[in-house]
Amino acid sequence: MNNTKIWLSSPHMGGNERNYVQEAFDTNWVAPLGPNVNGLEEDLESYLRNQSFVGALSSGTAAIHLGLILLGVKAGDEVICQSMTFSASANPILYLGATPVFIDSEPETWNICPIALEEAIIDRIANGKKPKVIIAVHLYGVPYKIEAIKAISNKYAIPVLEDSAEALGSSYKGQQCGTFGDIGVLSFNGNKIITTSGGGAIVTPTKALKDRAVFYATQSRDIAPHYQHSEIGYNYRMSNICAGIGRGQMEVLDDHVALRRNMNAFYVALFKDIQNVTVFTTPNDDYYANYWLSAIIVEPNLFDDINRETLRLAFEAANIECRPLWKPMHLQPVFEIYPYYGTRVAETLFEKGLCLPSGSNLTDEDRNRIESVVTFFFKTT
Ligand SMILES: *Cc1c(COP(=O)(O)O)cnc(C)c1O
């Protein structure tokens, strides 16, 4: 039997990427600017229904860093951040010398808990410091509680940085993820729903804010014939070569969303009769998830030696990559000294949760191999 590795989420080219890259070579636009960069920005703006402006950057992390700068974060400030996320959501807080304040998840969307969020804001204000920004994440492409978070943001006048790195193609009540925050962030890293090999974008509500982001991303050059700088700059613009890959990927984005949603439906059917496992799905039809990654919760059964880790190892033995959910930031050695508000929702999810192969390029044969592992594991353990 074919035993090649089945990945969690691997790059999936549509076909036209090479043409855009070839054109960049043919016209010598081998630089961090050019027609593909502008083209990708326009493609994204139209995908986001022309509600926002998009600046293409070298990574999603760069977009978060610039987003925090645009929202006025300075050294010594406090920034609220969903604890259960990838470290890139939180690292830029530290780049700026600010302090992260981590918030638990709520059980329905696994994202930032509105109750713990408000509790934290009240407590930080009582301690003498009002948080500057709220970083909320659409984990695995499932939108966070948009209305509840927006209401708290409005009530306390604290802007939201929407980390939509995993959620391009997801929407809430018909509005695209990436357009809900005061600033939005997208990622095109190699494992994301579309990739530029590495890259990201900042999404802003105004053209002025986008221009400001691009200014910082290109070393904060003042207008002058020589190199003149009044502010600290960054080298964060996207390469025209990478943007060419992105333009090809935009042509297949909706197909990729449909295929990842099919993977999620495959898992729902596969685990339907298995008591110990629940597949992570949206709470109701207001939420439309791209299901960038499909994830499950494994309720441990001591008697049968069923738990998240034994299942993961069974997949690993069959050369199938699975991974525990994001380990919450407040449990990470590098972040554990910072404040945390919540109970143990994120911790419990981390203990019991597993991400399964979710790529848009998985085949029937791959699905058969996954199914065999599951069938064997739950019948014989
Ligand atoms: C991937 C990811 C990022 C970072 O994006 P890069 O393009 O890899 O820098 C940020 N936040 C979340 C939640 C992510 O999954």
Image: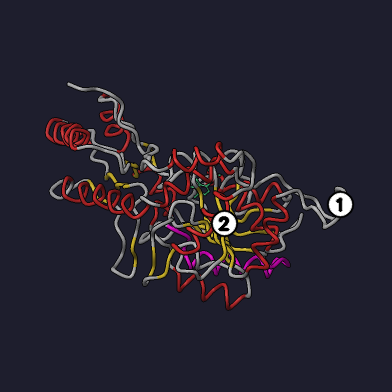
The C terminus: image quadrant: top left
Kind of element beneath mark 1: loop
Name the outermost residue toward the bottom: 155
Nearest the eye: 46 or 173: 46
Residue that mark 1 sits on? 225
Q: Quadrant where the N terminus lies?
A: top left
Tell me: residue 67, above or below residue 11. below
Task: Report if the beta carbon of the residue with label 1 is closer than 8 angstroms to ligand 1.
Answer: no
Dot 1, how many residues are within 10 Å of its Cα: few (below 14), some (14-19), or many (20+)? few
In the image, taking residue 374 as reference, residue 72 lies left or right, namely right
Span colored in magenta: 111-130
User: How many numbered marks are there?
Assistant: 2
Residue at left 37%, top 72%? Answer: 173
> 116 or 296, which lies in front?
296
Tell me, yes or no, whether the highlighted magenta stretch contains residue 102.
no
For the residue carrying disc 2, how many other residues have a C-alpha within 10 Å: few (<14), some (14-19), or many (20+)?
A: many
- The mark found on residue 81 in the picture is 2
Residue drawn at 49 percent across, 37 percent down: 22
